Amino acid sequence: MLCAAAIARDAKSVGPRPVRLLPPPCGDGLLLWRPKWRLRRRQRPRRPRPRRRRPKRPSHGTWHFWASPSTSARPARPRSACVCTACRRCSPSSRLSASRPARTCSSAPCSTTIPRTANRRAATWRKRALFLLSKGMLLLMERKLQEVHPLLTLCGQIVENWQGNPIQKESLRVFFLVLQVTHYLDAGQVKSVKPCLKQLQQCIQTISTLHDDEILPSNPADLFHWLPKEHMCVLVYLVTVMHSMQAGYLEKAQKYTDKALMQLEKLKMLDCSPILSSFQVILLEHIIMCRLVTGHKATALQEISQVCQLCQQSPRLFSNHAAQLHTLLGLYCVSVNCMDNAEAQFTTALRLTNHQELWAFIVTNLASVYIREGNRHQEVLYSLLERINPDHSFPVSSHCLRAAAFYVRGLFSFFQGRYNEAKRFLRETLKMSNAEDLNRLTACSLVLLGHIFYVLGNHRESNNMVVPAMQLASKIPDMSVQLWSSALLRDLNKACGNAMDAHEAAQMHQNFSQQLLQDHIEACSLPEHNLITWTDGPPPVQFQAQNGPNTSLASLL
C-alpha cells in the first residue's frame, strides 16, 4: 500500500492546486476533500414549509388583491390573484390584469363584483377631483377669485383625463362646468362664458340619457354624488337664466325660468330638500328683474310677494336673501317712480349685505336715483360716485358692473350739462359692453348718446345712435328704452321735416305709454304694493289693499 506522504508529494509535483487526502473515518479507503462551501451547501438542512390553512368563509364580502402576501398576517395567494371575501375562492384566472374589465365571482351563491387595481386608482382620482372642486366652490363663495382660476384649471385636467363610470364622469364635468360658468358670470364676462355654458348644456343632456343601473359601482363610496341628477337639471337651467339676464336675452330667460319652476314643483312633491327652495328664490329674483325691464310690474310685484312667503318659511333663507329682496323692492319703486321708497329700500339693502358685487350693484342704482332727484342729495351722490369710480378704485372686478359705473357717471355728467365728459364715459361703456355682449347697457348708452347729440344739434349723429338703440331695445325687449327712443325719434323727425316718420314714431310712443300706464295702475292697485314701505324685520304676512295709484306718472311718460 502506498504511503500517504508519497501520494501527496507526487500530487504536489503535478500541479499548483493539490488535492488533500484525509484518512477515512473507518476502513481502509481514503476520502477526497471537497471545498468547504460545497460541503455546507449540500449539508444545509431544509426547513419544512408551514402549512397554509384556509380561513373561514364569511357570509358576504368583496374581492381583494393580494399582491404581496404575508405568512403571518394573512394566507398567501398567487400574486395579483382575486379572492372573494364572500366565498374565499380565487377567480377562474389566477393571474388577472388590472387593465382588463372587472368580472364577478363565478361561484353561484356569490356573484360579487371584483374591483381591479385600476378601479381603486380611478376612485382615488375621483375623490381628489371632488375635494378640489369643493375647495373651488368655497373660494368662489369667499370671493378669492385669484386662487380660483388655477384651481379650476387643475380640476379641468383631472376631470378630462379621469376614466371611470360614465355617469360619475359626467357628474364631475357638470360640477366643474357649473363652477366655471359661475366664475365667468361673477366676473361679468357674458360673451366669454358661452363655450363653457354650451358644454354644460350638452353634458346635462348626456346625463339625462344615462341610467344609474347600467353600471354598478364596485365601491360603495362610488355611490356618492355631489348633487342628484334631477337637481343638476334645475341648476343648469338656473345658470342659463343668469347668463340670459346679464346678456339681455330676456325672453330666453323667461322661457328657461318657466321650465325650471315647473321642474321644481315636480321635485318638491317628492323631495323637501332646502336647496330646492334656494333654487326657486334665485330663479324668482332673476325673473323679477326681467319683468321690470319688459314692463310687467304687476307680475313682478306678485313674484316679490312669493319670495317673501318662501323666506317666511325658512329663517335661514331669509337671512341669506334679505338684501336681495330689498334690492328688488327698490328696483320696483324706481319703475313706479316712488323715489323716496326706492332710496329707503336701497339703503336697507346696503345695511344688510356683505357681498361686494351686490353692494356695487345697489350703490349704482342708488346713485341713479339721486341723479334723477336733482340737487337734493348732492353730497351723498358725490360720495357714492367716488366710491364706484371706474377710473381709479372700483371695488369689484366685474366687467359688467364696471361698465354700468361708467354709464352712471355719464348720466350724471349729462344732467350736469357736461356733454363732452358724458360722451367720454358713454363711449367707454359702449366699448366694454360690446366686448362682452351686454345688450341692455349697449342700448341705454346708445339712446343717451343720441339724446346728447340731439341737444347739441347734431341730428344726423343722433339718428345714427337712436335707431340701433331702438332695434336693440325691441330685441331685448326693454320697454323703458323703447319709450325713450320713440320720443327721440319723434322729435328728430320733426326737426328734420320728416312728417311721416315723425307720425309713426309718435304712434309708437303712444302705444308704449299706454302699456306702461296700464301696468302702472294695475301694480299700484295690488295689496302687495304696500311692501314698498317695509324696511325692517321679517317680511309682513298680510297686505292691505290699495285704493289706487298714488305716484306721479309725469317722469314715466
Image (cartoon, rainbow, N blue to C red):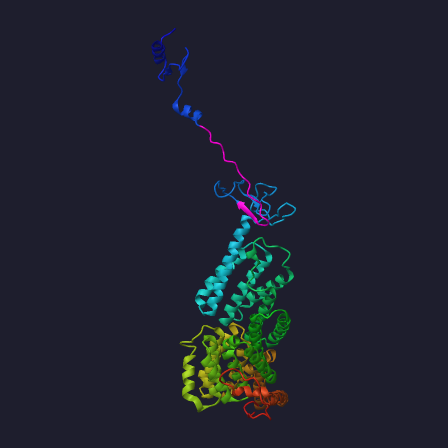
Query: Magenta segment, which residues?
Result: 45-65
Residue 254 visible in the current orientation:
yes
Residue 507: x %, y % from top left: 63, 89
From the image, give the main secondary structure of the stretch colored magenta: loop
Residue at 64 percent of width and 56 percent of height: 214
For the question of whether residue 424 can be seen, the reply is: no
Relative image position of residue 520 (x, y in whole percent) = 59, 88
Total number of numbered discs in the rendering: 0
| Up-down relation of residue 533 to residue 155 (above or below) | below
Most foreground residue, 503 or 482 = 482
Q: Residue 8, image x and y in percent?
A: 35, 12
Residue 53 within the segment the image draws in magenta: yes
Above or below: residue 378 compared with residue 396: below
503 or 313, nearer to the observer: 313
| Residue located 48% across and 90% down the image | 373
Residue at the outermost top position: 1
Q: Quadrant of residue 523?
A: bottom right
In the foreground, 253 or 474: 253
263 up-or-down from 100: above or below: below
Report the quarter where the C terminus lies. bottom right
Which quadrant is home to the N terminus?
top left
428 falls in the magenta region: no
39 and 426: which is toward the camera: 39
Residue positioned 43% across, 27% down in the render? 44
